[in-house]
Image (spheres, grey):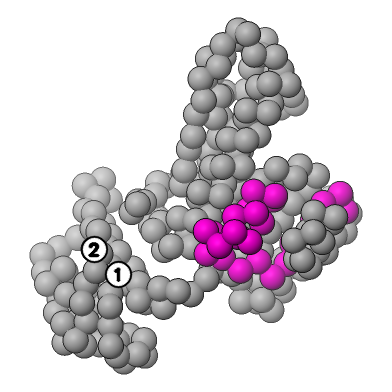
Amino acid sequence: MILTFSCDDTSGIVHAVSGAIVACSGNITELQQFSSTDTGRFFMRVEIDLPTDLVEFASAMRDVARRFKAQWEVTEANRRARVLLLVSKAGGPLNDLLFHQRSGDLPVEIPLILSNHDTLRPLADFYGIPFGSQVVLPENKHLFEERIRRCVDDFDIDLVVLARYMQILSPQLCEDLAGRVINIHHSFLPGFKGANPYRQAHTRGVKLIGATAHFVTSDLDEGPIIEQNVHRVDHSHTVSELTSIGQGLESETLTAAVRLFAARRIFLDGVRTVIFK
């Protein structure tokens, strides 16, 4: 089983949690903890070999959590996170997620893919994942977002992944799914926004390009960062080469972020994240 536990930092937390585990004849196989001096919060992730069932252990943990006013969750270690994918036309991140899911090294279930275009339906069909699409315009965007909400409820979705979904989610949907939506975008030093970012980067002669996966908030591309990767480039790289490298990094970084979420290794600490790897 996996226990995640966070609360205001104080003395006795680890002792109380480990005591509850011992009382249930459990054995701790992995424990990671962190105390944030910035927010005063304590975070802990524990993997437990437990002879009792989840319900019995959760009952024992409930008293500990109440004592520390903690946010906590206990799940079966082999439970696969259920993921809803949102896509547009770019297939790289989608293909990477589906490939690793089929390969067995990305512990998620993907019951559905939704899109504002029909472009990637053949890719979804290849992997045997149901695919739904509809045109999203300003006047019907709320209807598509209602469809997302229904799917989250109907399919018991843990995480929504924007795999290069080129629509901005409404502030209300961002709030409703806070901490449950991950996005990916390019990262340039310095940063370039707007059209043709790779051409802008080429024009300025950037030396580093990369990708950032983050939780989605109503502030565009400003949510808590989960994972980042960079790659050194130089003057000899063409625009198409920069684009290829950057898109590869985006796919790799998004898959890594989803993997961390599925393993219950991400904690929100205000505007940043605590990641136990």
Whether residue 109 appears in magenta in the rendering, the answer is yes
Q: Is residue 125 depicted above or below 94 in this figure? A: below
Up/down of 20 relative to 9, above or below: below
The residue lying at 87 percent from left, 59 percent from top is 134
The x, y position of residue 240, in whole percent, is 73, 21
Describe residue 154's horizontal placement relative to residue 136 as left or right.
left
Residue 47 - label: 1
- Residue closer to the observer: 38 or 16: 16
- In percent of the image, x 42 and y 47: which residue is there? 271
Tag 2 secondary structure: strand
Residue 44 image position (x, y, % from top left): 27, 63
Horizontal side of residue 214 vs 271, given as left or right: right
Vertical comparison of 16 with 194: above or below: below
Which one is nearer the viewer's eye here, 116 or 223? 116
Residue position for label 2: 31
User: What is the three-letter code of the residue carrying label 1?
Assistant: Glu
Locate residue 155: give its quadrant: bottom right
Q: Amino acid at mark 2?
A: Leu
